[in-house]
Amino acid sequence: MVIPGPDTRVVELRVHGVLGTTPEDLTGSVSAVEVAGDGLGQLVRPADRLRRPAPGPMLNAGGRPVPRVVEGYVWGGMTSGGFAKATWALLFPFAMANVAHWMLPPVREGSAASRGLGHLLRALLRLAALLLSCLLVSQLTVIFLDLVATQCLRPGSSCLPFAPDSLRGWDLGRAVLGLLPVVALVAVLHRVSTVSWKVNRSSDPLPADPERRRSRLAGLPGETVIADPDTPVLRMTHTVATLAVVAILALGGPTGATDGSNDWLWWSAAALFLFGLLATALLDDPPELRARGGLGGRLRRFLGSWPSQVMVGASVLLVALVSVRLGPLPAELPASTLTVEVVAALLALCCVLFGALLVPAAWLARVEWRGQPRDQRPWAGGWFSAPVLTLAALLGAGFGAGLTLTVRQLLGRGHLADPEGYEAITLLWGAGAVLAVVAVAVVVPVVLFRRWLAERRDRLAPPETTLLHAGRPEDSRVGARAWWWAAAQRRHLHHILLLVAGVLSAGALIALVVRLADVSLPDWFDPLAGIGVVVLAALALALLRTVHLAKRRPETAKVLGILADLTSFWPREAHPTVPPCYALKVIPELADRVVHHLKDPGVRVVITGHSQGSLLAAVTAARLAQSLPDADRHRVGLVTHGSQLQWIYARAFPSVVPLSSLAELSGALRGRWRSLCRGTDPLGGPVTTWNRQVYEGTLIGVGFRADGSVGPLPAATRSPNGALVLGGDHWLPDPMRGPFTGRRWSPGVLSHYDYPVDPEWDRAVAIAAGLELPPRDTPTTGSLLSALGVGSDGAAAGQSPPRGAADPIDGGGGGSADPEGRGRPPGRPSKTSLSDPVPPPTEIPRGRSTPWERAAELPVKGG
């Protein structure tokens, strides 16, 4: 702890979460003014009546007032608001395929099989993303070239009566009219993939030598969140392959050109399509191989700027030649639906192979989380990337099919031929909609009954609420209800996603079998097909209507921006046509601002992040821990609130934010990472502790220690504000205590919002700034460890202690036999009877812990 001096001041740098926020709400002020930034990334402070930056409220640190500056970083403009950003919702299936890449399990070190499976999985992901682009473009080609130009505008058709007869009799004009919108769409997708945010900073706070970064601290969260140099080549392969599919569809489909004189065009298109597939599959260049120059790096250098431009130009020229040489258009394009079906079949094959290969890859990677509690292990055992990719494929196919069926309905069903392949898709989505209604009708009453039964048996309120709301029975009752619902949502979110993906996958399999076997369905299936048409049309129209309204009502785009907020954090890897990654701009600018403040030797900076902002804040703190000298690193702290770092990101993205990386960051900050959480928060949760339970009226648990090790923690202490502090987690009572004199008051259940209003906020900021000691209560017996089912050596009961296990009695900076000071997360503790013999107290080695941690063992004068 540092005793505040006359020049000491704290800069509180706040980062908001999803859906954006106003500068006033972020800084907790009536008025705010921008003090730095470029408009997209705004650094704001509270302002006085003259619109000048004003100081924040004084911070009470250990009974001493310390000046505080409140700054906020507003990044919502990168994802929310405006017509252009609202159109990114149409790219949501592409973004999901890109997110699936970041959900892959880690590659096991020293395992050639794991490394080979990693290459195959990344290649299949990129192929699936490419085929998803081709599927959308082929469906749009069916709309413009087949339904509109060929069928609706054919001579003698009553469809679109305002079209002149001269256009109906002009085959070249109809062909150009059908192909030009598709080429324009491909150009728009190509343009979207080139958009990126420019970083605005005065200097690079990270060292130029990456080896120095790795030698300082390794395994911190978000190390791989960097720009992929393969993106320009991926952009080219997507453009070439999609235009090649357009040409193949126009010439006659996958079986060959209908006109023998155009065979050379068809073979040229097929060659370009195969080139796109092959280049995309081989373009695998993970960061660990780039320095050694792998195959992906050589291919990237070979397909540089001008070769990529040549390939794109050749594909555009091919489509232009196809439009000229099509000749007289038939009544309807032959095999247009077959082209869509072949692309969809290839996409389905990639998804199936991906899911099958992901099983052994996750099995090999399980050594990374085998010792962790079950509720901290990756979702679906590290296999969660497969259902996400499946949902991306089904949503992309459903959106295109819904758009096609809607256009056909608007143009007039009597004038246009029925697309054969879409019957299976309508059946799939119709059955999915019915199953969803049935599931809701069954699950909701069951959930309500279980809640009623828990309340009737007095099991609704967890023991934590009794501790947090001691002496306030009404608040305890209200908080218990919100706590139960929030815990249920956090516990079953991934189950719901798995169920949706499973139901849709089963429906897709049935539809595929029906289509391939050419089975005639009974009449009672007709209502399902009708429901599917309605669902697909509603899906397409809802997205298009939202984009249209966003131009007139920006708040519509702001609500829609939550999709971009969650998916646009991840850089382009599997799919280039996704919204630009805001993390590549926000994290460097936050780090640059921290370095700017640290130039004043009396300043201590605390980065605070809410919800999604907690991920940005944690990765920023990790980058600073890798780059700053020790003297400056000790002046940086971190406060997360309403965070998903543990219950979502560590489990859904095990290779990017594993639990071990969070422990590493906790050790790097040496106790200056505080996490505020509420049990009533359905979106946020604890970050640094788990296996919590109430034992003899005391909250105990396992979590991160200040030295970076993991093990049993001292019992929770109650702060003067009523919060329970266990390890680095501050459990806030909700509804909050108060009102408090001189502080803003928010009644009722606050859930995921308004964390800074709680008086515990200032205490957490003071601890993170290193100006106040974290609460420590060194136990003198092994009873708490016995209750947790953990031995005195940190191992689960009945297990042998791990080599180099840290001393479990030391709650913060205790000694450890591990030379690196880091322990592995323990396994889920086994059930241990309280009558078991209590392990003897472990002696704390002198010189390996701080004096206040050895207070109970220090001699007392005159005693």
Image (cartoon, rainbow, N blue to C red):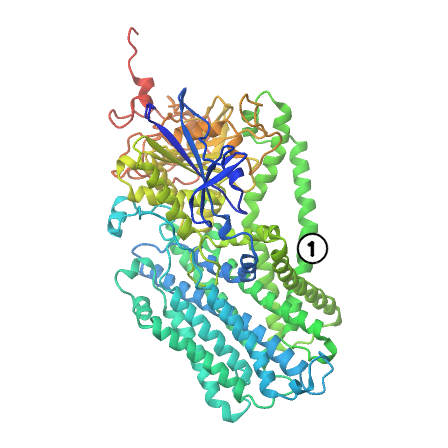
The residue positioned 72% from the left and 67% from the top of the image is: 530
Count up the numbered dots: 1
Measured as percent of width and height from the top left, residue 368 is found at: 37, 49
Instruction: Residue type at mark 1: give it.
Output: Val
In the rendered image, the vertical position of residue 83 relative to residue 591, given as above or below? below
* Quadrant holding the C terminus: top left
Residue 441 location in percent, x, y?
70, 51
Extreme residue toward the bottom, this view = 261
Label 1 residue SS: helix
Q: Residue at x 51, y 58 (%)?
A: 388
Q: Height in image: 396 above or below 805?
A: below
Horizontal and vertical percent for residue 382? 45, 53
Residue drawn 55% across and 77% down? 180
Above-or-below relation of 489 to 461: below
Q: Residue furthest top?
A: 862
Q: Dividing the picture into quarters, in which one does residue 339 lie?
A: bottom right
Q: In which image quadrant can residue 513 be found?
A: bottom right
Question: Mark 1 Cα within 10 Å, few/some/many (few <14, many 20+)?
Answer: few
Which quadrant does the N terminus fall into? top left
Can residue 797 be seen by looking at this rendering? no
Image side of residue 255 versus residue 12, left or right: right
Residue 588 in the image, given as x and y percentages of width and height: 37, 48
| Residue closest to the eye, 713 or 20 | 20
The residue where tag 1 is placed is: 437
Direction front: furthest residue: 50
Q: Nearer the viewer, residue 224 or 42?
A: 42
Question: Residue 188: in sight, yes or no?
Answer: yes
Measuring 61% from the left and 83% from the top, which residue is drawn there?
Answer: 174
